[in-house]
Amino acid sequence: MKKIILILLAFTLTTNAQERKKCVTTTIEKVGEHKVKVIRKNTCGDQMVINIQTYLRKDWQALQKKRKQRKKRNK
């Protein structure tokens, strides 16, 4: 009986994970030679939220590198 419950629970968790949709989209635009404009659109919820930030290219590359390292470490 316990095995059946565990199998059903695992099945429901995997189907719920597949139903998730991406709410945040990120677009990157180059502004000049040294700057990058990052636009994040969050479509979850009632209103669409748009964040616009500009970074120096060097700072943006450093952020991307840190995220990549964090993602590798957490796998």
Image (tube, rainbow, N blue to C red):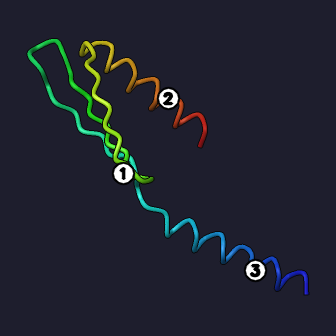
- Residue nearest the viewer, comparing 73 with 64: 64
Pointer 2 local density, CA inside 10 Å: few below 14, some 14–19, many at least 20: few
Q: Amino acid at mark 1?
A: Thr
Left or right of 29 on screen, residue 42: right
Q: Earlier in the sequence, mark 3 or mark 2?
A: 3
* Closer-to-camera residue (45/15): 45
- Tell me the distance, in whole angstroms, between the alpha carbons under discs 3 and 2: 34 Å
Q: What is the number of the mark on residue 58?
A: none
Q: Amino acid at mark 2?
A: Gln
Q: Is residue 18 above or below residue 52?
A: below
User: Would you place residue 42 above or below residue 17 in this image?
Assistant: above
Helix, strand or loop at label 1? It is loop
Q: Residue at x 27, y 28 (%)?
A: 52
Disc on the earlier residue, 1 or 2: 1
Counting from the top left corner in percent of width and height, residue 6 is at 81, 76
Question: Residue at the spot x=26%, y=29% of the render?
Answer: 38
Give amino acid for label 3. Ile
Which residue is at a point 24% across and 16% down the rendered structure image?
57
Instruction: Give the quarter of the image for residue 3.
Output: bottom right
Residue corresponding to mark 2: 69
Q: Compare residues 55 and 1 and report the one nearer the observer.
A: 55
The numbered mark at residue 7 is 3
Is there CB contact under 8 Å for labels 3 and 2?
no
State the residue at coordinates (16%, 12%).
34
Number of disc labels: 3
Find residue 19 and report its horizontal and vertical position in percent. 49, 69
* Circle 1 residue: 43
Q: Nearer the viewer, residue 50 or 67?
A: 50
